[in-house]
Amino acid sequence: MAEASIWERYWHFDRIASCFDGAGASNYDESIGAGWRDFFCALPMGARIIDLCTGNGAAALIAAETGRRENKAFEIVAVDQAKIDPPSYVTRHAEDFAAIQFEGSTSVEALPFSDARFDAAISQYGIEYSDLARSIPELARIVAPGGVARLVVHAADGVVAAGSRAVIAEADLLLDRIDLPGSARRCFEAVSAVERTPGASADARRRADESFADFQTALMRTARNVERASDKMMFRNSGAVLLDTFKRRRHFDVSQLLAKADEIHAEIHAHRGRLTALVEAALDKAEANALAEAVCLAGAKEARATALDNRDGLIAHVVEAQF
């Protein structure tokens, strides 16, 4: 399983999904949401559903929404290895969140539920991050006879993974070649030392001038990359926050200024870590077929893998199983 810490801070914000959030009739765009609504509509009244590696509950919310609209009275449990608490952070969908029981700090490789506890097991861009040799037998153990599973996993040969690889390279550009947070930190420290030290030495003033020039160069290089970047927000926001911090530097202690530069570095590094985990977890077509076979070997009567596309191309592999 990808390190939980790189996701915990991510999920402690007002966001639902890690990809394709914010569009469509629910919280995923139609290319993903439609498949989930069809799946949940086919479930019987009162079906017991578990969402594995739920994050902030994107797929579970579609289950709750469908259950409410179709008057199906689903029982929904959603688990994640990270310390999640979606209702405390997400400002949307309060009514549907109330229908979901969230369980954070829960490993899908060792689920705390009895055998045959659920009628449906689902995962949206989640279970592929786990140790599949352990999580798939656990999935099969907790699904009752006659139950179903639907797993939507990242496609190694798809557009999401390709975009993630591009942003990883952009993060490396910001952190290494441009060194935006590093140049900001050196500038904050050197300039503050001169401004807050009466009679600062000539060497100190020279260091302040040089570090300020380096920071300006880093900001300009960052700005030049915004329009051609895959992740424009990463470039735009990191530059804007650090420039604003410099402009308001006299309102803060030096330690606070340095902490802000370190925070931006940590945010970019964590973003890179999440995308690296995505790329490493993504499955190609053969691996998706192997996952379907593993679900069968674990106890499913049948399972198959299919491709899921949107207008941009391949976005996922979908494994559906009948127990």
Image: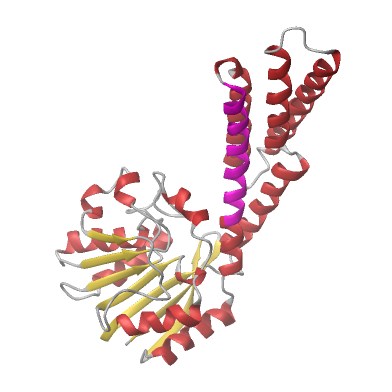
Give the x, y percent position of residue 270.
Answer: 58, 50
Question: Residue farthest to the top?
Answer: 199
Q: Answer above or below: position of 1 versus 259.
A: below
Q: Answer above or below: position of 35 versus 8.
A: below
Q: Nearer the viewer, residue 165 or 101?
A: 101
Is residue 134 within the magenta segment? no
Number of numbered discs visible in the structure rendering? 0
Direction from residue 309 to residue 14 in the image, left or right: left
Q: Answer above or below: position of 270 versus 202.
A: below
Q: Is residue 2 visible?
A: yes
Residue at image coords 40%, 69% = 123
Q: Nearer the viewer, residue 22 or 261?
A: 261
Q: Which residues are magenta?
A: 253-273
- Magenta part mainly helix, strand or loop? helix
Asked which quadrant contains residue 181, the reply is: top right
Residue at image coords 27%, 69% = 40
Is residue 254 within the magenta segment? yes
The colour scheme of the drawn protein is secondary structure
Direction from residue 313 to residue 92 in the image, left or right: left
Q: Is residue 231 visible?
A: no
Q: Nearer the viewer, residue 287 or 218?
A: 218
Give the x, y percent position of residue 124.
Answer: 42, 66
Q: In the rendered image, which quarter contains the C terminus?
A: bottom left
Give the x, y percent position of residue 269.
Answer: 62, 48
Give the x, y percent position of residue 225.
Answer: 70, 38
Residue at image coords 33%, 84% = 141
Asked which quadrant contains residue 165, the reply is: bottom right
Direction from residue 203 to residue 314 in the image, left or right: left
